[in-house]
Every structure is written in structure tokens, then in C-alpha cells.
Amino acid sequence: MVNRSSSSGLSVAVMGKQSSKYNAQEGALLLDWVKQITGQNTVNVDGSRENFVAQLKDGTLLCNLANTLVPGSVKDVVVQAKTKSSSIFQQINNLELFIDFCHKQGVLKQELFRAVDLVEERDLYSVCMTLTSLGRIMVKRGKPGPRRVSAHEIVNLPLADQMRIQEIKTF
């Protein structure tokens, strides 16, 4: 990881809010979709934060996903061993190639994650949002998309937000 000073004050609250948005069930469904599309049976589909990051952090699996969906769409992928010594710059380069692919496929700019979100494990929810959006676009093109968390399930929301949603549904 990049050496930064530790967060304090409002940034801790913001990071906590971003961290709480990640849903392990959604992460597992997205990893399962990536595994099915790429045909890579070695992909661990456990939705834990640690595994989600471990599977996607170096960007090679995501670039493989892009090339499987649209052959030849991502070139110059740096394939590297999944070790701590693999270069952050190589990881970021691969992730940027994937993000660029998603944008070219029609994923809206506000739905794209930033490479740092995944490399530094800052905002995994935005990574899920990008993959979900890409899946939605692929479904429109006749390709399989990821399964989704059931709409009736309210997950990872504070009680106050759950109550507010229930109130909105009753109007």
C-alpha cells in the first residue's frame, strides 16, 4: 500500500461509511459471475472483503473478464504473481485498463471505481457498482450478467436507514 498519514476526524467517518456499504453477499455473486464468464475455476467466490480484494486487486482477473466479454479489448495486461512484492504501479495500470474498458462499454463515469479504491481497499462498494453496471450492459447485449442480491433484502444498512426505507415503501 501507499504510505499515507493515518486518517482522522471526518475522513475516518467517511471511510467507515464507505466500508460499511460493502456487502459480502453481493461480492460473492459478482465473483461468481466473473468466474463463470472467464472460466477460471481457481477464482475463490467467498464474498469476504479480504477475498474480494485478493481476487481483484492486481487487475489481471478484471482484464481477463474484459477480454472474455469483448475479445481483444484490453491489451498490455501485466500478468504477475499474486504476492506482496508485485508492483502497485502494475496493479494500478491493469485496473485503469479495466476501468477504461468499462467506460468504453457504456458504464457511466459516476459508476466507475477508481483504481485506488481497490488497491488501498478504500471503497469496495464502488467496485461492486462498476461490475454490476457492466453486467447490466452485457445483459442488454445478450450476454449473461451477475445474479443480484434479492430486492426484498435490506443489508448493511443502519437501523435508521432501514426504518426510513420502510416508511418510504408505505407511501
Image (spheres, rainbow, N blue to C red):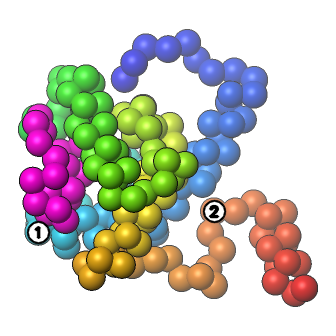
Residues drawn in magenta: 57-78
Residue 156, numbered label? 2
Q: Regarding mark 1 in the picture, which secondary structure is present there? A: loop
Residue 144's spot in the image, x, y percent? 27, 79
Q: Splitting the image into 4 quarters, where does residue 146 fall?
A: bottom left
In the figure, 171 relative to 35: above or below? below
Based on the picture, tell me whether residue 60 belongs to the magenta stretch.
yes
**Residue visible at 70% across and 62% down in the picture:** 157
Please, what is the three-letter code of the amino acid marked with disc 1?
Gly
Position of residue 130 measured from the top left corner of the image (x, y, whole percent): 43, 55
How many residues crowd mark 2 within 10 Å: few (<14), some (14–19), many (20+)? Answer: some
Q: Say which amino acid is labelled 2.
A: Asn
Q: Is residue 8 magenta?
A: no
Q: Could you say which is closer to the camera, residue 26 or residue 106?
A: 106
On residue 3, which mark appears?
none
Circle 1 is placed at which residue position?
Answer: 39
